[in-house]
Image: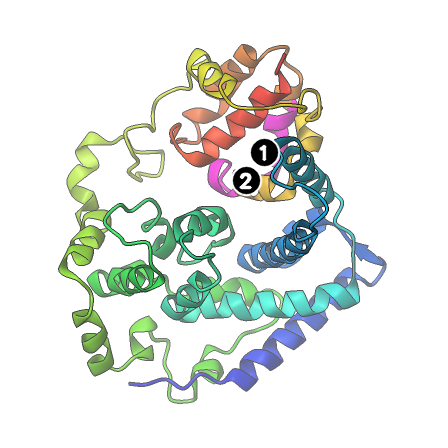
Amino acid sequence: MTTQINSNYLEKYAEEFALKVCDRFFANRQFITGQDIVQLTPSLQVNLFIIKRLFELWQEELGKLKSSPFFDYRDIAVHEALTQFMNVLSRRIKMERNYLAPILEEAVMHSIQVATDPVNFFHQELQKAPAGKLNDFLKENKKYYKWNEVLISSLIDKTGLGHDLDSYQRAISSIVQANPLVVEDPKNLLSSLDEELSFDLESYWGTSATSSTQEEVSSPQAVEEEFTMIEEEEIIIIEEEIILESETSIETPSDSQGRKGPASQGRLLDAAHLKNVFSNESYKGMKGILGELSESLALNQRFMFTKELFDGNADLLRHALKSVDEVNSFDEAVDLINSRFVLELNWDIDSEEVREFMQQIFRKFLE
């Protein structure tokens, strides 16, 4: 069955959703802050897409700034100062309603698209990546994808893929073809929107649509033709990543919910090893800048750490940061993190998120 998307319904719904949210939030306030955006709507995905768009706009502004022929933006001191400046700005978001509303509408539409047609959504997302930097783009943006994120996370650092856009797009399609169950049920995902404004999935998909899965969007013939274009080695990669995951479960520890993790889960952080790694990195001019961790992290870092390390609990992250602020050394901070969070939350200590989190703590105690 071929489903006809009702774009008029999508646009009208997003507009009404944004109107309702803005009416509620700005009833007695003139501005919204970054922390307000985190909890603006019942849908974390919508809130993350708002932040994502803000950072895209900031990058556009930064690109304009760097285009000036009068200054050397490649200088490391300039780069570090500019990075710190952007981090400070991220903690000082202050938007009026007329600026937030269109960004919120776009975030709602993108959330619905990633829930109902994730393959095409991520195909379009990849087109935003700079040439030759697709993997870096995925790493940077992964923290913003709450729904159907497996279609992206399984491709990061995948050595069997080429570096061109077509290879990544075909690989995303092959994930769904190899195991359609990886696509989450759109009804379940979109239920969070219903808490603010009821979303009619049948009106969006057309009156003949049922509570179908993503398979109904494309005809069987079209799916078969697309699938035959995928190279055999790419299919093997996807099967190893998703289907054969159960074969390695004996070798990997489980968390409290029975999920399997890599070998680096279940281990503790080593303060000496971390100091050796981080001490070889450049922090020129950065001493003392971080100050209190609970006040100094950039907004995008807060989102990433909350989502990836603290089970989506922003209060737990704040508690962790304040606890670290109360200790006197990096070694004490590592002991605290190990005793309270690493095993309890089943951290993968080799993950990029853990590395960046500990890097910020190291910088706080940099002598």
Residue 309 in the magenta stretch? The answer is yes
Q: Please tell me in which quadrant of the rendered image residue 348 appears.
A: top left
1 or 2: tag closer to the N-terminus: 2
For label 1, the crowd category at 10 Å Cα-Cα, with few meaning under 14, some 14 to 19 and many 20 or more, is: many
Residue at 72% over, 46% down? 70
Q: How far apart are the two marked residues, 1 and 2, measured between alpha carbons? A: 6 Å
Mark carried by residue 301: none
Q: Position of residue 129 (x, y in %)?
A: 46, 58
Asked if 162 appears above or below 212 in the picture, the reply is above
Q: Amino acid at mark 1?
A: Leu
Q: Amino acid at mark 2?
A: Thr
Q: Is residue 151 left or right of residue 289?
A: left
Q: Main secondary structure of the magenta part?
A: helix
Q: Position of residue 334 (x, y in %)?
A: 51, 17
Q: Is residue 347 left or right of residue 336?
A: left
Q: Residue furthest front?
A: 70
Mark carried by residue 306: 2
Q: Is residue 154 left or right of residue 18?
A: left
Q: Range of the magenta residues?
A: 305-322
Q: Check disc 1 and report the residue beneath it.
A: 317
Asked if 303 appears above or below 365 in the picture, the reply is below
Q: Position of residue 223 (x, y in %)?
A: 23, 76
Residue 195 in the magenta stretch? The answer is no
Q: How many badges with numbers are in the image?
A: 2
> Which corner quadrant holds the N terminus?
bottom left
SS of the residue under disc 1: helix
Residue at 19% over, 48% down? 240
**Answer yes or no: do the residues labelled 1 and 2 have beta carbons within 8 Å?**
yes
Q: Is residue 19 left or right of residue 12?
A: right
Residue at 31% over, 40% down? 259
